[in-house]
Image: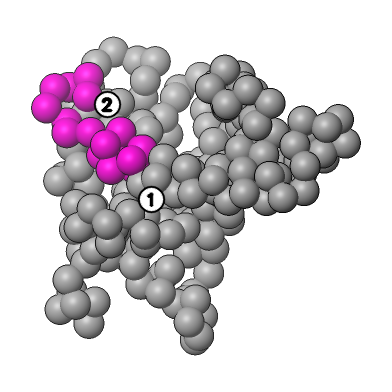
Amino acid sequence: MNSAPSSPALDTAPSPVKTPDQIKPKHKGSAQLFKNPVLERLTHTHIALPVSIFLLTAVGSLYYGLTHGFIDGLSAFGLFLAGWFMFTFVEYAMHRYLYHIPATTPKRAKFQYTMHGVHHEYPKDKTRLAMPPIVTVFVASLLFFIFRFIFGSNVFGILAGFTFGYALYLFVHYAIHAYAPPKNFLKVWWTHHAQHHYRQDEIAFGVSSTLWDHIIGTMPKKAENK
């Protein structure tokens, strides 16, 4: 259990919840979301678990689709890229429109803090940089059924690319918060995400890719990158 100062608990009587503009980054400690020790423990995970689950889903999906004749080599490559491309937009949209939902009511503020605000308050908390394994398995399974309904047998290529993109996102996000920026071209990932955390949270929503920030117009201005 974490001994850091607790934040609004979800299984207690209503208490004041911090809105996004009230959250100040703390580089030590961890928030307490639940007083129930089991629920609280389930909100923490080692990054290797969800990354491995999504990578295994990607590999297994491609393997099954290819060996059972649902997709061939060329279509698998194209579907994989399509799934990966889809993920980059979902990553951006989820971050911008769900994780940063305006905290216009106490319930919205609590939802926003639990889903994402806690990460802005404790950005160095390595155990809360990804969803718990049980949720990861549920999400991977749900994605399969959704894509199966939409894309039919092409699901095996689409799902592989999408879950690979998810694993890459988790790895990149973890590296950005856990390690110092490298002295090479990869530093752009660190710089871009730092704008979102420490300058203004209305920009730089892409983590594994800046593509949609460029397209939609939420890239940091050059003056803000200095």
- Residue 77: in sight, yes or no? yes
Among all residues in the image, which is located at the extreme left?
A: 104
Closer to us: 195 or 12: 195
Q: Secondary structure at mark 1?
A: loop
Magenta stretch? 93-108
Picture disc at residue 139? none
Label 1 to label 2: alpha-carbon separation: 16 Å
Using residue 80 as the reference point, say whether residue 179 is left or right of it.
Answer: left
| Magenta-drawn stretch contains 95 | yes
Picture disc at residue 110? 2
Among all residues in the image, which is located at the extreme bottom?
A: 183
Number of numbered callouts drawn: 2
Instruction: Please give the name of the residue rendered at 22% of the width and 19% of the height, measured from the top-left corner.
Output: 107
Q: Secondary structure at mark 2?
A: helix
Percent x, y of residue 81: 58, 51
Instruction: Name the residue type under label 1.
Output: Tyr
Q: Is residue 167 above or below residue 183?
A: above
Percent x, y of residue 206: 37, 55
Image-quadrant location for residue 15: top left
Q: Is residue 69 above or below residue 76?
A: above
Among all residues in the image, which is located at the extreme right?
A: 67
Image-quadrant location for residue 162: top right
Q: How is the image coloured?
A: one colour
- Residue 56: in sight, yes or no? no
Closer to us: 11 or 50: 50
Picture disc at residue 122? 1
Instruction: Name the residue type under label 2.
Output: Lys
Percent x, y of residue 99: 32, 37
Percent x, y of residue 113: 30, 34
Instruction: Please give the name of the residue rendered at 41% of the width and 70% of the height, measured from the top-left corner.
Output: 190
